[in-house]
Image (cartoon, rainbow, N blue to C red):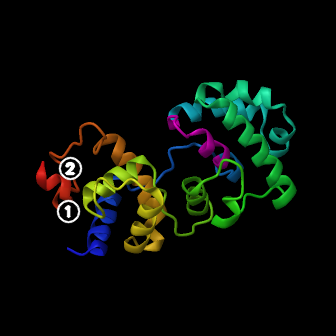
């Protein structure tokens, strides 16, 4: 089976299981809020970020409010997300730069997003794919683990950039962003890190790891 055929089948099977490709971060369509939440999600669960941001955005609801807030105030608001000092510093600087360099608008180009404090390729791809409808592969831990098990690359490969390029070449551009959202839900419910549910898995017939299980 060619990689493109395997990818097409995986896309269709995941569509059947998850008809709605929803982002696990509840940002209500606001680009800046998704950017903030994506930064907070590093080494933190999406559920925790969603909870923390209810209070965060009630106090600091705009880039201007975030940019003008003392960093100590931001630290207290995001403390339970972990790495709170670094994250608070990035959120303040990110918001400042959005105002001074981009007129308060979240950029829609990967290269521009990568110039913002705390923004790497995973966040940048999430933004351009989820908000602006561009082809984008978000190589989070679920994506890296599951696509390795499926056989798109050796399971021991963990380099997010290399994996992004491999998957971008085999998944249809219009499907990439939604595929990554579905992979997150699939990774939480079925193909977990410690105990993949191979028995009854809808992807087992196209999965190299499943064939060995």
Tell me the number on the disc at residue 201. 2
Distance CA(mark 1)–CA(mark 2): 10 Å
77 to the left or right of 211? right
Residue at x 65% of width, y 34% of height: 53
What residue does disc 1 label? 206
Could you tell me residue 85's position as x and y percent?
69, 31
187 to the left or right of 81? left
Residue at x 79% of width, y 32% of height: 71
Q: Is residue 109 visible?
A: no
Secondary structure state at the residue bearing disc 2: loop
Relative depth, front residue between 92 and 128: 92
Q: Residue 128: which quarter of the image?
A: bottom right
Residue at x 21% of width, y 58% of height: 207
108 to the left or right of 165? right
Main SS of the magenta part reads: helix
- The answer to whether residue 5 is above or below residue 51 is below
Residue at x 28% of width, y 45% of height: 191
Q: Which residues are magenta?
A: 34-46
Could you tell me residue 19's position as x and y percent?
39, 56
- How packed mark 2 is, by other alpha carbons closer than 10 Å (few <14, some 14-19, many 20 or more), is some
Secondary structure state at the residue bearing disc 1: helix
- How packed mark 1 is, by other alpha carbons closer than 10 Å (few <14, some 14-19, many 20 or more), is some
Relative depth, front residue between 65 and 81: 81
């Amino acid at each position: 089976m060619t990689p493109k055929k395997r990818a097409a089948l995986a896309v269709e099977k995941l569509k059947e299981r998850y008809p709605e490709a929803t982002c696990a971060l509840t940002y209500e369509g606001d680009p800046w809020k998704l950017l903030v939440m994506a930064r907070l999600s590093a080494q933190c669960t999406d559920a925790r970020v969603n909870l923390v941001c209810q209070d965060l955005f009630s106090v600091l609801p705009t880039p201007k409010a975030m940019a003008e807030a003392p960093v100590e105030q931001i630290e207290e608001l995001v403390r339970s997300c972990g790495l709170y000092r670094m994250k608070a510093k990035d959120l303040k600087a990110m918001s400042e730069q959005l105002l001074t360099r981009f007129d308060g608008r979240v950029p829609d180009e990967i290269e521009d997003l990568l110039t913002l404090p705390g923004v790497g390729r995973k966040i940048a791809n999430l933004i351009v794919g989820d908000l602006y409808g561009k082809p984008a592969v978000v190589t989070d831990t679920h994506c890296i683990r599951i696509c390795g098990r499926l056989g798109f690359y050796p399971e021991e490969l963990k380099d997010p950039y290399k994996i992004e390029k491999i998957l971008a070449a085999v998944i249809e551009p219009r499907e990439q962003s939604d595929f990554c959202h579905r992979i997150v839900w699939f990774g939480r419910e079925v193909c977990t890190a410690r105990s993949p549910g191979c028995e009854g898995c809808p992807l087992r017939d196209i999965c190299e790891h499943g064939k060995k299980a």
